[in-house]
Amino acid sequence: MSDCGCHHEAKNKEERRILWIALVLNAAMAVIGGIAGWIAHSTGLLADALDMLSDATAYAIGLVAIGRTARFKANAAWVSGSVLLLLGVGVLVEVGRRVMYGAEPVSGWMIGTALVSLAVNLKVLRMLAPLKSGEVHLRATWLFTRADVVANVGVILAGLLVWWLASPYPDFVIGALIGLYVIKEAFEILGDARRAHADARKTPA
């Protein structure tokens, strides 16, 4: 009966591999979605790109934190949560600006880009499925990606409504909803960071 920890090491290696792939795919789609959102004048696409960036940030923290101290993990989470909060507020400000001054989102760009994002997120979700019953931070990555799938579908529906109604308001609505969701995620990360800091103070250095 071997108890050398080889199984645990192999499991960690596989988790790292999955998180790296998920990180690269999400970061790439965040950049593509952000550029497409700018070209298409779509707050929905910009907010969706931000949501994918928040997931990429979560994966990066998970990777960087492996083998680090509890205090380091708490600080990393606090920084990412603060950045996400600022970005989420920025999305809401941009939605408000476009409502006030007008915008003409391009439905074709919205639908096409969101379909590609949806395909990527479904692949990542399938890859993360074995981790959803694991440790809390691994379970969180699966939940974040599942929320991305919902956001992608929302942008597709908003794009169809923009085309059908010849109105930018469906895009404004989905952009605001995703922006609010990112802010909620940011507060959750900050809450986790605060609790982690408290736990780290209780643990001797």
Image (tube, helix red, strand yellow):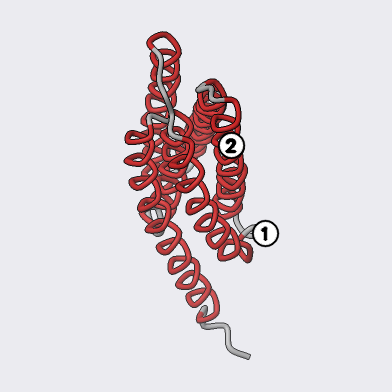
Residue 147 position in % (x across, y down): 60, 43
Foreground residue, 150 or 116? Answer: 116
Mark 2 crowd level (few <14, some 14–19, many ≥20, 10 Å Cα): some
Q: Which residue is mark 2?
A: 160
Mark closer to the observer (2, 1): 2
Residue 92 vs 78, above or below: the answer is above
Residue drawn at point x = 58 percent, y = 58 percent:
122
Q: Amino acid at mark 1?
A: Ser
Residue drawn at point x = 44 percent, y = 52 percent:
59
Let me know if residue 138 appears in the view: yes
Residue 18 position in % (x across, y down): 48, 66
Residue drawn at point x = 36 percent, y = 39 percent:
34
Image quarter hosting the N terminus:
bottom right
Q: Amino acid at mark 2?
A: Leu
Residue drawn at point x = 40 percent, y = 20 percent:
103
Upstream in sequence: badge 2 or badge 1: 1
Mark 1 crowd level (few <14, some 14–19, many ≥20, 10 Å Cα): few
Foreground residue, 41 or 177? Answer: 41
| Residue 53 circle label | none
Q: Which residue is mark 1?
A: 133
Left or right of 35? Residue 84 is right
